[in-house]
Structure formats: structure tokens, C-alpha cells
Image: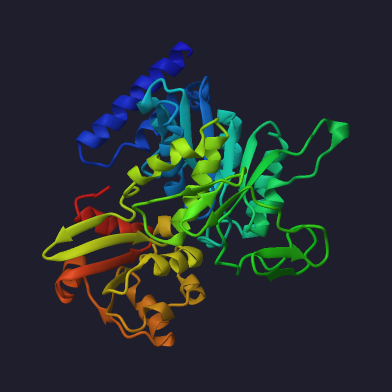
């Protein structure tokens, strides 16, 4: 690397270490921020010489990144932003901290995918899903799909692993070829894990016609856009690979959605030449992801943490949670988005019949929503009060981003 990049990388590592030592966080942002101030091209310099995978989407990025890093680890050391800092500052900090590694798997905020594609020149990019998220400050789903599509037009050499079940992702991953301009379509490998949330993909992004569905298939009623055949699919408690071989997947992570994340990870690793039979056992080593799914025993209660930040992810959280007392916590700080009206897109009916507690800055907004849904609840003012209010045994905790981090801090920043 150029001298400036070497100095910037060293300062980045030092700043991150000091942040961790001072208890100010894990250093995954501040190190990269300082490094990029010294050398604005530091991310590109740190990426050079590495085979890189980028993982992006509205939901599941952090978990899929961790699983993909475990799978690619068959080949050698892998740099990754394992704590979810998914903007260029986080990528820079992660690569600087890791030092020289042949591989990197980086989670990328969907709004930054084009910028990070430009800086890192990855070997493969995984596109998971697109749904509404923090619309008071973020883009509508169709606008996000358009940005992805435009980015892939400029990077047709990158290999794409994409979700066949999401019409927005399929459209974004298949930009039209333009032989006159030397633009060819990207090489796409499709995976299928099922898509339970459909409310953001009833209208075709190509022509505006209605999307129709029948079983696992979907198609546009007004143009040729339709579900492609998937090479990687979830079947029972395993994954079918492109050869038709079935691989049993044993995870420590709950829910069918994580089986889909595992299928994606195997597909990403295969793009680096990793055989599924060699990678599948490594997926079991992932037990929690930056606190997500972590289980902590306290005062006779087994507390499990689940992160849910938008309607699609709350739907999956209900599927993961056991029939046990459940604490719901909602904030509306800047990282969460300030608008809580999305709560009315979530069906809380699966919580009926269990003890439900609510807390957080916007607990009263949640109270109104639960009342409309006919779900009885108890308001508690603090996490400790919730622990005391439930009997010994399992306590499920489902929280949006800053509420999750508050509770995680009370549990000593469990990872």
C-alpha cells in the first residue's frame, strides 16, 4: 500500500483498540472513520489483493455474513465486519483490524452497495431481499431496487447470488444487456428459501402491473418478469445444491429464515470454490451474531435476544420465538427511524395466549397496536422489572435496534 494508506491503516487499528479499551464500543466505526479521514481511498487500498464477498439486503445481512465467513473459512483466514458496522467506515475498520487475509466477507447497508462495489471490486455479491425499512429517512423499495440495478450495470464482472423468491431482487439482479455498449448481463446464481413477507412486492418494478403468486412461483401479469429457477433451495432441514445433492444443515440459530441464510452462505462460498460438503459443518459453529440469538441465564431465567426492526423481520421473529413469556421493546431514536406507524403493518396475533410485556421509549405506541390486535400486555419501565415479572424459565426478548442494544448492554454486551 502507499505510505499514506499504511499510516491510515495503523491509526485506524490504534483508534479502534483504544475505543474498545475505554469501553466506548467495539471500535468498528471510529477506527474506519479516522482512517478514511487520513486516506479517503483507504477502503480500496485495503481491499486490493483480497477475494471479497459483499452481502446486502434489508433483513438478514449480519447473520448471512457471519455464516458466509464461516463457510469461506474452509479456504483460509477471512476478514469480516462481524459486529454489523455495515457502512464504509465499518468495512475499513474491519479490513484494517484483520491485517493481510486472502478473503473477506462484508455486510453492506443496501444504500451503500454501489459505493462499496466501486471501492472493493468484489468477486461476488449476495442480494438477500428488499422491504420497507425506516421510510422517514430511507428510500422506497422500488427506488432501492433501481439503485442496485444501476450499480450492477457498471460491474458486470461481479458474480451475483440472488434471492429468486423476491421480485424486487430478481429485477435488480437482471439489468438488461447492451451489446452496443459492451454491457453484458451479470452471472447470477439463484437461491430459494421461501418469502413469507409479500407486502412490498405486489407491483412489478419493470412495468407496474400486478405480481401474481401460486405456491412458490410468481410472475408479472404485464411483462416477462417471473421467478427464475433456483440452483440452491431449502428442502426440509437441509439444502439442495446445483448438482441435486442434499446437505443436512444443523444450526444453533433458530427459525426457518436462518436455514435460508445458511443456503445463501453455501452458495456464496461455492463461488470461491468451496464444496458444500466441506462448508456445511462450519455453519454449526455460529451460535449468536452481535448479540442476536444470544442466550443469557439471569435470576433463574433463560433470556434469548431477537432483533426485529421492520414488519418483515418481526414476522420472522415470531416464528423463531418459543411459546414463552415475551418482552417487546420499541424505541424511535435516529438509528431506528423516528416513525413508528410501521407497527400497524405487523400482525401481533401470534403472541396471543402468552405473557406479553412491553417497554422502551415508545412502549405506548406498541400498547395501542397490541390493543387493536387483541393481545393482552403488561407495561414495565425497565428490563430488570421484566425479568422479575416472569416465572423462572425462558424469556423471549424481541426489540428494535437501539432497544436491542440497550438490553444487550444490560447483559454486559453479550455477543
Q: Nearer the viewer, residue 52 or 76?
A: 76
Task: Identify whether 162 is placed above or below 104.
Answer: below
Q: Is residue 115 among the parts visible in the rendering? A: yes
Q: Is residue 186 left or right of residue 252?
A: right
Which residue is located at x 41 percent, y 20 percent?
100
Quick one: which residue is furthest to the right in this view? 180
Q: Which residue is located at x 55 percent, y 36 percent?
A: 270
* Residue at the extreme left of the image, as rendered: 299
**What is the number of callouts on the image?**
0
Q: Residue at x 81, y 40 (%)?
A: 177
Residue 243 pos. (x, y %): 62, 42
Q: In this view, does 227 lie to the left or right of 34?
A: right
Residue drawn at (34%, 65%) of the image: 398
Residue 119 sits in which quadrant? top right
Q: Nearer the viewer, residue 90 or 105?
A: 105
Left or right: 304, with 274 as reference point = left
Horizontal and vertical percent for residue 174? 73, 46
Residue found at the very far front of the displayed protein: 245
Q: Can residue 85 be seen in this view?
A: no
Residue 288 in the image, given as x and y percentages of width and height = 32, 50
Figure check: 9 above or below 160: above
Q: 85 or 196, which is in the foreground? A: 196
- Please name the colour scheme applied to the rendered image: rainbow
**Left or right, 167 with reference to 21:** right
- x, y (%) of residue 34? 39, 29
Amino acid at each position: 500500500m502507499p505510505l499514506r494508506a499504511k499510516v491510515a491503516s495503523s491509526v485506524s487499528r490504534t483508534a479502534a483498540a483504544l475505543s474498545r479499551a475505554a469501553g466506548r464500543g467495539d471500535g468498528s466505526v471510529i477506527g474506519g472513520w479516522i482512517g478514511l479521514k487520513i486516506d479517503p481511498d483507504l477502503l480500496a487500498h485495503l481491499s486490493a489483493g483480497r477475494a471479497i464477498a459483499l452481502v446486502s439486503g434489508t433483513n438478514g445481512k449480519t447473520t448471512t455474513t457471519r455464516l458466509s465467513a464461516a463457510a469461506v473459512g474452509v479456504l483460509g483466514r477471512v476478514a469480516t465486519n462481524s459486529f454489523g458496522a455495515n457502512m464504509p467506515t465499518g468495512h475499513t475498520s474491519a479490513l484494517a483490524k484483520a491485517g493481510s487475509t486472502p478473503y473477506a466477507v462484508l455486510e453492506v447497508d443496501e444504500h451503500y452497495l454501489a459505493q462499496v462495489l466501486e471501492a472493493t471490486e468484489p468477486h461476488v455479491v449476495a442480494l438477500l431481499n428488499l422491504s420497507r425499512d425506516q421510510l422517514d429517512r430511507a428510500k422506497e423499495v422500488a427506488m432501492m431496487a433501481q439503485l442496485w440495478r444501476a450499480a450492477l450495470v457498471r460491474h458486470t464482472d461481479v458474480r451475483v447470488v440472488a434471492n429468486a423468491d423476491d421480485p424486487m431482487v430478481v429485477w435488480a439482479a437482471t439489468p438488461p444487456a447492451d451489446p452496443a455498449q459492451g454491457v453484458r448481463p451479470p452471472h447470477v446464481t439463484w437461491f430459494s428459501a421461501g418469502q413469507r413477507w409479500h407486502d412490498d412486492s405486489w407491483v412489478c418494478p419493470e412495468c407496474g402491473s400486478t405480481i401474481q403468486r401460486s405456491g412458490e412461483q410468481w410472475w408479472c401479469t404485464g411483462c416477462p418478469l417471473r421467478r427464475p429457477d433456483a440452483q440452491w433451495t431449502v428442502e426440509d432441514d437441509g439444502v439442495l445444491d446445483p448438482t441435486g445433492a442434499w446437505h443436512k444443515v444443523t444450526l444453533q440459530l433458530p427459525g426457518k429464515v436462518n436455514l435460508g441464510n445458511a443456503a445463501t452462505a453455501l452458495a456464496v462460498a461455492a463461488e470461491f470454490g468451496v464444496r458444500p460438503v466441506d462448508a456445511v459443518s462450519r455453519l454449526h459453529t455460529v451460535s449468536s451474531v452481535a448479540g442476536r440469538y444470544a442466550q443469557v441465564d439471569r435470576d433463574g431465567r433463560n433470556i434469548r435476544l431477537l432483533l426485529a426492526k421492520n414488519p418483515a423481520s418481526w414476522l420472522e421473529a415470531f416464528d423463531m420465538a418459543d411459546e414463552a413469556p415475551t418482552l417487546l421493546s420499541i424505541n424511535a431514536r435516529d438509528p431506528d427511524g423516528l416513525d413508528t406507524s410501521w407497527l400497524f403493518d405487523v400482525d401481533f396475533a401470534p403472541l396471543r395466549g402468552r405473557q406479553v410485556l412491553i417497554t422502551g421509549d415508545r412502549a405506548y405506541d406498541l400498547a395501542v397496536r397490541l390493543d387493536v390486535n387483541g393481545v393482552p400486555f403488561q407495561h414495565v419501565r425497565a428490563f430488570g422489572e421484566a425479568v422479575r415479572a416472569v416465572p423462572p424459565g425462558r424469556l423471549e426478548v424481541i426489540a428494535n435496534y437501539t432497544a436491542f442494544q440497550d438490553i444487550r448492554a444490560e447483559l454486559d454486551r453479550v455477543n
